[in-house]
Amino acid sequence: MRDELFRKPVRALTDFEFNEDVAAVFDDMLSRSIPFYDEVHRMIVDFVEAFYQPQSALIDLGCSTGATLAKIADDSQVDIHRFVGVDDSEPMLDRARQRFSDHPLASRIVWQNTDLRQVELEDPSVVIMNYTLQFVRPMYRQSVVNRIYQSLRPGGILIVSEKVLEQSTAISRLFIEMYWTFKRRQGYSDLEISRKREQLENVLVPYKVDEQLELLAQAGFGEAEIFFKWHNFASFIAIKDYTA
């Protein structure tokens, strides 16, 4: 379904919620709102093939409608023992379950409707957070990443994709304006862009690139780098040392 949520008249502005209305158009929203969304997915599949360890779990934190897990399940050449999709939005998980209802690997997938701060992370070698950590309140982010690091097998990876800011305020502003231009090319009007931005203002809190890397370093990851960046979007890979 096409994302036209912010074309509709609203009586009062509220914070963005991952409700049924959003879940119904979420796949279109992501594909039209995140630059190089498909390419980042392809890169993630490559990382899964390089780092997934036999008999371990692959966990997607903030899995939404299951698009990332579906890409891995369909395209990865490794035998994934157990998929875990975690989201605190039941409407999103309903869509994910529907996506996998007839999938040959459906029996290997566990869906969990829970807060990321409380989820049990059982023996993963790959953890993915695509555009998820930015919605966790900043005071909790370090503890969330710490728990992921502690749960990962040595040699395992964490992949994080986020909106980001730069050290330079002027360049951050420039990148955001470039992003709005991108969204206009995807068919969003200035009104839609403005309404969504206002709804997200108190919900999505981006970090600077160096703050994001410091978050990973403080958790214990000795190796962490950007593997993709487009203006104010970045994807990071962090590797847990084999000796940890």
Image (tube, grey):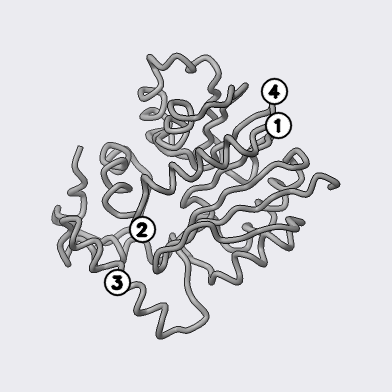
Local crowd size for mark 2, using a 10 Å CA cut-off: few (<14), some (14–19), many (≥20)? few
In what element is the residue under mark 1? Answer: loop
> Of the numbered discs in the image, which one, if any, rests on residue 50?
none
Residue 90 image offset from top left, x and y in percent: 43, 33
In what element is the residue under mark 4? Answer: loop
Q: Nearer the viewer, mark 2 or mark 3?
A: 3
Query: In the image, what residue type sits under mark 2?
Result: Asp
Q: Are marks 2 and 3 in contact (CB under 8 Å)?
A: no
In what element is the residue under mark 2? Answer: loop
Q: Are marks 4 and 3 in contact (CB under 8 Å)?
A: no
Local crowd size for mark 1, using a 10 Å CA cut-off: few (<14), some (14–19), many (≥20)? some
Q: Which residue is mark 1?
A: 122
Query: In the image, what residue type sits under mark 3?
Result: Met
Whichever of callouts 4 and 3 sits on the residue coming sooner in the sequence is 4
> Of the numbered discs in the image, which one, if any, rests on residue 55?
4
Q: At x 65% / y 29%, what residue is drawn?
A: 57
Q: Which residue is mark 3?
A: 178
Q: Nearer the viewer, residue 200 or 64?
A: 64
Whichever of callouts 4 and 1 sits on the residue coming sooner in the sequence is 4
Q: From mark 4 to mark 1, how far is it between C-alphas?
A: 11 Å
Query: In the image, what residue type sits under mark 1?
Result: Glu
Q: Quadrant of residue 137?
A: bottom right
Whichever of callouts 3 and 1 sits on the residue coming sooner in the sequence is 1
